[in-house]
Image: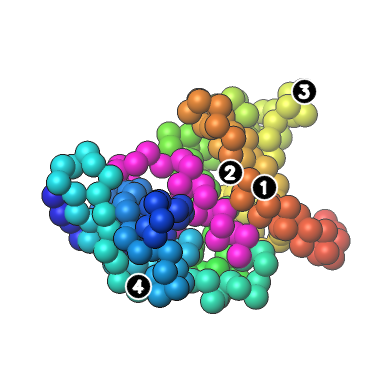
Amino acid sequence: MEWRDQGAVLAVRKHGETSVIVDVFTENHGRHAGVVRGGISRKMTPHLQPGGQVSLTWKARLEDQLGSFTFEPIKSRAAAVMNDPMALSALNSITAMLAFALPERETHGYLYVDSMSLLDKLGNDPSWPLDYLQWELSMLEELGFGLDLSSCAVTGAHDDLIYVSPKSGRAVSRKGAGEWADRMLPLPQCLLGQAPLEYREVVRGLTTTGHFLTRFAMEMGDKPVPVARDRFLDRLQKSAALEPPRFEG
């Protein structure tokens, strides 16, 4: 068995004395693992960092075997984020979340495109935190936990949508929430793609997506959401605390 593809490195763990097992999110073969012989060498290690883009050849005698990878580096994304702690923590969160959530060897074409686009923006595009939030929405959609933010689940209205139902994942208007408002999740406008970058609003949006990611984790065997996401959220919250106050008109 043999195939060729490309993708981003998600995780690397030691295998034997000199080899490593590399987990990669590929374009046409989904999340896939393979052994890289000599992967702990000084020559190979710099190219097998989380987020790095590689061209791969996978070989195995049988399709269901672990198999082995040979690879060629395409680009490293580490340099773009090395001096930006928040972008670096986001990169670690993205790769950890993909490794955690995606079933092995199942293609996710749309999420692949969104993930590679987001990884490329880290450290390069100042608006990347908004893109990260939208990426978590895309991931929830792929996992079967997509949010319906088009209209109020109670009244059917399309305006004044400020909450998300923690049970159904549907938007709820101010009027529709009524006395249940304190039980709702926040729906900041940036979650709808209708607001400029404000860290505090992105944090509110990630509170909502995090609720459904936790639900997914529980249904998958009560596995915890990766700590890397918590670290990223913590850094984002600290940056949000430094933003000037927002005054409503």
Q: CA distance from mark 3 to mark 1?
A: 31 Å
Q: Which residues are magenta?
A: 88-116
Q: Earlier in the sequence, mark 4 or mark 3?
A: 4
Colour mode of the rendering? rainbow
Q: CA distance from mark 4 to mark 3?
A: 56 Å
Q: CA distance from mark 3 to mark 2?
A: 34 Å
Residue 236, above or below 191: below
Q: CA distance from mark 1 to mark 4?
A: 30 Å
Mark 2 lies on a secondary structure that is loop
Badge 2 amino acid: Pro
Residue at the extreme front: 17
Examine the rendering and report whether any part of residue 226 can be seen.
yes
Q: CA distance from mark 1 to mark 2?
A: 7 Å
For the residue pair 93 and 158, the one nearer the viewer reads as 93
Q: Mark 1 or mark 4: which is in front?
A: 4
The question of residue 207 being in magenta is answered with no
For the residue pair 223 and 109, the one nearer the viewer reads as 223
Residue annotated with mark 4 = 73
Relative to 96, 60 lies left or right: left
Residue annotated with mark 2 = 226
Q: Earlier in the sequence, mark 3 or mark 1?
A: 3
The question of residue 95 being in magenta is answered with yes
Quarter location, residue 102: top left
Q: CA distance from mark 4 to mark 2?
A: 27 Å
For the residue pair 184 and 61, the one nearer the viewer reads as 61
Decide: few, some or many residues near mark 2? Use Cα within 10 Å; few <14, some 14-19, many ≥20.
Answer: many
Q: Which mark is residue 179?
A: 3
Residue annotated with mark 1 = 230
Q: Main secondary structure of the magenta part?
A: helix
